[in-house]
């Protein structure tokens, strides 16, 4: 059996997935050598159907490739397997290989969850898992291979300068294969010998990806050589009419380039830079701003269309710069700073609060407050334990106040973030949580939970009922 053809236009190109990240490609990134490596590791029958199992055969048959003797033997002639439309296969592949939060522009909850990923550990795992799944699907049969091609190039990850050059060579050989790329990650680890040729390769890659939506350096280790090229890379994105999201280190030159060249940017994630210099952020169309911990202070914010603000550091300057009337999603470390003006946040639908804040001091909600729009409250880090009597009393009052219908009449959902590893709670704290859970259920407030970083960064909430009270106690 001959190996399957991977074709775009009139030119045959061997499996592109192999050079999408160096983890799979080893030391040699050439397409030809990668094909030889795959040919020695994958048997022809596996390449055709993905496995020796009947499932692999039926998958090929459903895709409309039921020509082999093996398929005809396994699929009963009296009950032919229906051929699924391309649209259904595309929806299945998209769902199976989706990376939560990586492609979102308007789902602020998913974007916020994605940015909680410490050093990109979960994002790396999800990307590599998705790529393996895409490769497996594309290897089932020729029809699925053709359907899967746009998904193989949807998300590119570049791990070195030479890797960028290899990706560029691949894009040049294909016919419009970069049109399906919506996100590019620059993921450099350690010290890299980054030079002008690597920067040129990146800017050329951008030109081959006209439908690019997101560019990220959130997985990069800080390095002076490649960071100097960031303003140039941002300038190269000027004419990308679909570009809306960037994740970069907070440097003055970088922000100046964003302000100059990315007029339609909607999502900006700022990560720690080299120098903690006060920053000014401007964005005419900016709708979501995320500021990571250890990032320099944002002294001035000009974003009239801002809808979501996720501040993961103790920043005293940014809150007065926010226009509260349009904010829909708010996550800050110190909620006390905006409590007195909460009635002016008239579009707020989701508010994120640290569990520590609920226990360390009493929250004095404004007198007569009846918030018109708040629907969901997220309680972060529900693994903070308290020992003194004052903390226990603050915790009881504050936990009950956030579900008080006279204060928040429209709250219908409370989300709690639990630790993956559970310690035994002090009895007083366990009693408060159990009382609070019962009150939520009596008042018709849905309680959802997740555990650990994988669920947190994936925004994977599940319903918490009284039958599962042990999860929260």
Image (spheres, rainbow, N blue to C red):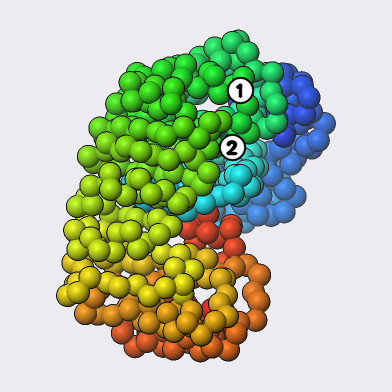
Q: Where is residue 239 in the image (x, y as percent from the top left)?
A: 35, 18
Answer with the quarter of the image where residue 214 lies. Answer: top left
Q: Nearer the viewer, mark 1 or mark 2?
A: 1
Could you classify mark 1 by the number of other residues whose Cα lies within 10 Å: few (under 14), some (14-19), or many (20 or more)?
few
In the rendered image of this protein, does residue 35 appear above or below residue 378? Answer: above
The numbered dot on residue 291 is none
The numbered dot on residue 224 is 1
Left or right relative to 85: residue 191: right
The numbered dot on residue 219 is 2
Mark 1 element type: helix
Left or right relative to 445: residue 366: left
* Mark sitting earlier along the chain (1/2): 2
Q: Can residue 182 be seen in this view?
A: no
Q: Position of residue 231 (x, y in %)?
A: 46, 20
Q: Where is residue 440 in the image (x, y as percent from the top left)?
A: 37, 82
Tags 1 and 2 in contact by the CB under 8 Å rule? Answer: no
x 54%, y 12%: residue: 200
Q: Can residue 223 be seen in this view?
A: yes
Q: In which quarter of the image is the N terminus?
A: top right
| Most distant residue in the right direction | 40
Report the Cα–Cα distance between label 1 and label 2: 15 Å
């Amino acid at each position: 059996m001959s190996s399957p053809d991977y074709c775009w236009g009139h030119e045959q190109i061997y499996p592109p997935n192999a050079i999408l990240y160096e983890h799979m490609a080893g030391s040699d990134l050439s397409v030809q050598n990668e094909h030889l490596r795959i040919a020695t590791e994958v048997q022809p029958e596996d390449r055709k159907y993905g496995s020796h199992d009947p499932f692999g055969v039926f998958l090929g048959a459903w895709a409309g490739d039921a020509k082999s003797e093996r398929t005809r033997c396994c699929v009963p002639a009296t009950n032919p397997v229906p051929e699924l439309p391309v649209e259904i296969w595309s929806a299945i592949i998209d769902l199976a290989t989706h990376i939560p939060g990586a492609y979102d522009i308007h789902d602020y909850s998913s974007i916020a969850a994605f940015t909680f990923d410490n050093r990109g550990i979960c994002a790396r795992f999800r990307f590599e898992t998705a790529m393996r799944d895409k490769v497996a699907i594309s290897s089932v049969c020729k029809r699925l291979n053709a359907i899967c091609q746009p998904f193989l190039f949807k998300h590119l990850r570049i791990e070195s300068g030479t890797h960028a050059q290899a990706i560029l060579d691949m894009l040049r050989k294909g016919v419009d294969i970069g049109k399906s790329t919506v996100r590019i990650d620059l993921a450099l680890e350690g010290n890299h010998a980054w030079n002008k040729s690597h920067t040129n390769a990146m800017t050329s890659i951008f030109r081959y990806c006209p439908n690019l939506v997101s560019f990220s350096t959130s997985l990069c280790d800080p390095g002076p050589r490649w960071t100097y090229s960031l303003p140039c890379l941002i300038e190269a994105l000027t004419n990308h009419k679909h570009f809306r999201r960037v994740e970069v280190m907070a440097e003055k030159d970088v922000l100046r380039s964003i302000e100059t060249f990315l007029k339609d940017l909607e999502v900006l994630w700022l990560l720690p830079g080299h120098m903690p210099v006060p920053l000014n952020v401007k964005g005419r169309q900016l709708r979501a701003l995320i500021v990571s911990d250890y990032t320099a202070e944002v002294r001035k914010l000009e974003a009239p269309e801002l809808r979501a603000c996720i501040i993961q550091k103790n920043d005293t300057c940014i809150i007065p710069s926010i226009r509260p009337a349009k904010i829909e999603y708010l996550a800050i470390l110190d909620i006390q700073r905006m409590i007195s003006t909460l009635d002016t946040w008239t579009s707020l639908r989701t508010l994120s609060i640290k569990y520590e804040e609920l226990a360390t001091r009493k929250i004095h909600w404004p007198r007569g407050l009846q918030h018109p729009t708040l629907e969901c409250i997220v309680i972060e880090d529900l693994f903070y334990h308290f020992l003194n009597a004052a903390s226990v009393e603050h915790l009881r009052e504050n936990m009950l106040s956030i579900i008080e219908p006279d204060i928040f009449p429209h709250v219908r959902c409370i989300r709690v973030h639990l630790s993956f590893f559970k310690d035994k709670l002090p009895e007083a704290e366990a009693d408060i949580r159990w009382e609070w859970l019962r009150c939520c259920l009596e008042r018709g407030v849905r309680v959802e939970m997740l555990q650990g970083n994988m669920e947190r960064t994936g925004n994977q909430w599940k319903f918490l009922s009284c039958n599962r009270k042990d999860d929260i106690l």
